[in-house]
Amino acid sequence: MIAIQIQLNSNLFLRDPQETKLGKKIIEYSIVLIEELGFEKFTFKKLAKKIESTEASVYRYFKNKHKLLIYLVSWYWEWMKFQIDFNTMNIDDADKKIKIVLSVLVESSQTNPAIGYVDENLLHQIVVAESSKAYHTKTVDLENKEGFFSNYKDLCECISKILLEKNPSYHYPHALASSLIEMANNNIYFAEHLPSLTDVKIKEGNLEDIKGLLEHFAFSSLRQ
């Protein structure tokens, strides 16, 4: 069992949901409902009904559902970074570290029983389908100044440093890092919903095709 404390920007919430029983319930069931309904149809009213509480109680933790979405995807980005740090510890071989990174990008839905109120598998599905809505907004510049996307940027920085271990002279490590993250999410989504937009297939949950795609792009780019 891996024990981990997720640290997120305090501007994302009015009260840290990780500190109370109700807050953890809000996180747990917001994941369930967003995955079930989609972000557009998800409301605090529906969440309050699900947890047998009031809308007012939800608003005491989050100003709006947009900030809740950023909170959830930031939680997942930090979870991914933790897994990369943990699984590449004491490994010197750059190729092996990159393959670990790419596996994490594709398969970081592994459930951590130490955090019972977060279903990482469902959250991964939300990240694949909804994460771009967290930062493809008119308010992205203001939110960036307030540090809303610090976990995503930390994840990209972590990956870019590992990529540079393979090729220290590579000119675009941050661009490649963010592209690999988005490529993983987009191609999982395409394979499941818009198969003509990708060349990879997912059969019975097997994501090896996605990992092969990421390895091709990562190592081909780093050989330039």
Image (spheres, rainbow, N blue to C red):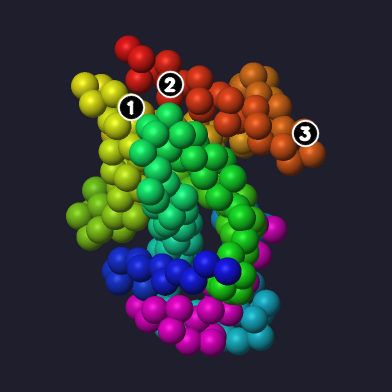
Q: Which residues are magenta?
A: 14-36
In the image, what residue occupies the spot 58% across and 69% down? 1
In the image, what residue occupies the spot 24% across and 48% down? 141
Q: 131 left or right of 192?
A: left
Q: Which residue is mark 3?
A: 203
- Looking at the image, is mark 3 or mark 1 nearer the viewer? 1
Helix, strand or loop at label 1? It is: helix
For marks 2 and 3 on the same chain, the one whose residue lies earlier in the sequence: 3
In the image, what residue occupies the spot 43% across and 38% down? 97
Q: Are marks 2 and 1 in contact (CB under 8 Å)?
A: yes
Q: Is residue 197 above or below residue 12?
A: above
Residue 126 covered by magenta stretch: no
Q: Residue furthest top?
A: 224
Q: Residue 133 at x, y = what percent?
A: 46, 47
Q: Residue 45 at x, y = what percent?
A: 59, 75
Q: Is residue 12 visible?
A: no
Q: Residue 206 at x, y = what percent?
A: 72, 37
Q: Which residue is mark 1?
A: 166
Q: 202 left or right of 170?
A: right
Q: 82 left or right of 33?
A: left
Say which mark, if any, is on residue 219. 2
Residue type of the residue flagged with mark 1: Lys
